[in-house]
Image (spheres, grey):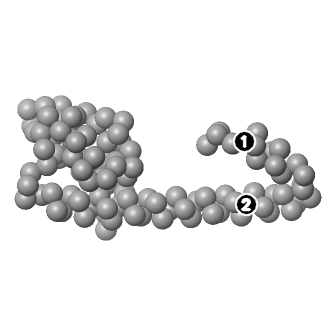
Amino acid sequence: MDSPCNVLLRIPDLCPPIRPARLTNRLRAWWKLDFMAFRVEIKKAFKADIPLEQRSEWESFLRENAEKIHSLTAEFEKTEREIDAAVYRLFELTEEIGLLESSLAGQY
């Protein structure tokens, strides 16, 4: 079973052997791109397109792994909210919650 991390290992396979397979920042964050944007970024980074016979496979591969990342991200965010709520209860914080959360906003 492929993990979302394996996508980063497979992306360089799309690079022609005559070019260095350097990933752009957008390719490193591939799950944020739809397939068309991914293809554009591949063309930009590798000066080559995904071979026609591989496009469906790559599109499915990226979609499935992006769904895993989005699901895990949602799980992490839910768990963080639950931990925050438990800490607030533990320390009996009420009106301080808004101040605390606004001061932490943007740190993640």
Residue 70 appears anywhere in the view:
yes
Within-10-Å neighbours for mark 1: few <14, some 14–19, many 20+: few
Q: Is 71 situated left or right of 55 in this image?
A: right
Q: CA distance from mark 1 to mark 2?
A: 15 Å
**Mark 2 secondary-structure assignment:** helix
Dot placed on the residue nearer the N-terminal end, 1 or 2:
2
Q: Would you place residue 23 above or below residue 54 in this image? A: above
Residue drawn at the location 38% of the way across and 45% of the way down: 29
Q: Name the image quarter holding the C terminus.
A: top right
In front of the other: 5 or 103: 103
Residue drawn at the location 84% of the way across and 57% of the way down: 88
Percent from the top left, x then y, of residue 63?
Answer: 31, 62
Task: Write down the residue under mark 1.
Answer: 104
Question: Mark 1 near mark 2, Cβ–Cβ under 8 Å?
Answer: no
Percent from the top left, x then y, of residue 95?
Answer: 90, 52
Residue drawn at the location 80% of the way across and 45% of the way down: 100
Task: Specify the amino acid type for callout 2.
Answer: Ile
Q: Residue furthest bottom?
A: 1
**Mark 1 secondary-structure assignment:** helix
Within-10-Å neighbours for mark 2: few <14, some 14–19, many 20+: few
Say the numbered circle drawn on residue 83: 2
Residue 99, picture quadrant = top right
Residue 3 appears anywhere in the view:
no
In front of the other: 70 or 102: 102
Q: Is 79 situated left or right of 4 in this image?
A: right
Q: Is 9 situated left or right of 76 in this image?
A: left
All told, the count of numbered labels is: 2
Task: Specify the amino acid type for callout 1.
Answer: Leu
Q: Would you place residue 90 above or below residue 103 in this image? A: below
Discs 1/2, front: 1
